[in-house]
Amino acid sequence: MSAERADARTIAGPTASRGPIDGRGDAVQRSREAVDSKRGVWAEDATLAGLTLTSRAQLEDELVILSKLFRRLAEYLALDENPGSVSLDRFAGFLDAHADALFTVPDGHTTTLDTLVEVTGQTARLTVPPEWIVFAKK
């Protein structure tokens, strides 16, 4: 999968890396309005509703999800020695081991990405809106 192709279907949305978050309000508000009205890329976004993974081609070519979630799914699948496998059986553990530090706004709760991703069978979803997440820089 090329980086160019991967970036074409992921969302460069309202999440942020840790640093000054003053001024995020307007961007978050506009993003929330677009999400709520299903405008643009948000019409296809499966980040909160949940994506049911059926193939690697689907992840690469069809699904529109938060870029961090896409990258972690792609990394997870790349570790599988069976090139046709898309099992999410160990994805929650993979996220836990990866420990992507973040905090949520407005409450400022410090946590990691694995605590905000729900995996049920072949379906994964983010449990909080992306605009509530601020990733810590590594």
Image (spheres, rainbow, N blue to C red):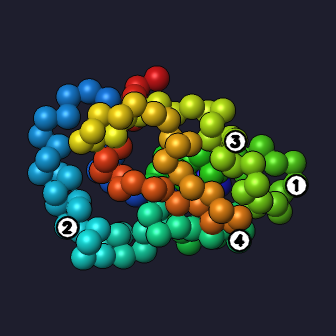
SS of the residue under disc 2:
helix
Viewer-side residue, 12 vs 97: 97
Viewer-side residue, 3 vs 43: 43
Is 49 left, or right, of 32 in this rendering?
right
Q: Residue at x 23, y 60 (%)?
A: 31
**Residue mark closest to the camera, 2 vs 1:** 2
Tell me, for residue 54, which label it has, or none. Answer: 4
Where residue 84 sits, quadrant-wise, is bottom right
Residue 22 showing in the rendered view: yes
State the CA–CA distance, disc 2 to disc 4. 30 Å
Where residue 30 sits, quadrant-wise, is bottom left
Q: Residue at x 57, y 68 (%)?
A: 51
| Residue designated by label 1 | 82
Residues under numbered marks 2 and 4 in contact, where contact means CB atoms less than 8 Å apart: no
SS of the residue under disc 1:
loop
Residue 60 showing in the rendered view: no
| Residue designated by label 3 | 93
- Which residue, as the protein is rendered here, is positioned at the far top? 138
SS of the residue under disc 3:
helix
| Residue designated by label 2 | 33
Name the amino acid, label 2.
Glu
**Residue mark closest to the camera, 1 vs 3:** 3
Tell me, for residue 7, which label it has, or none. Answer: none
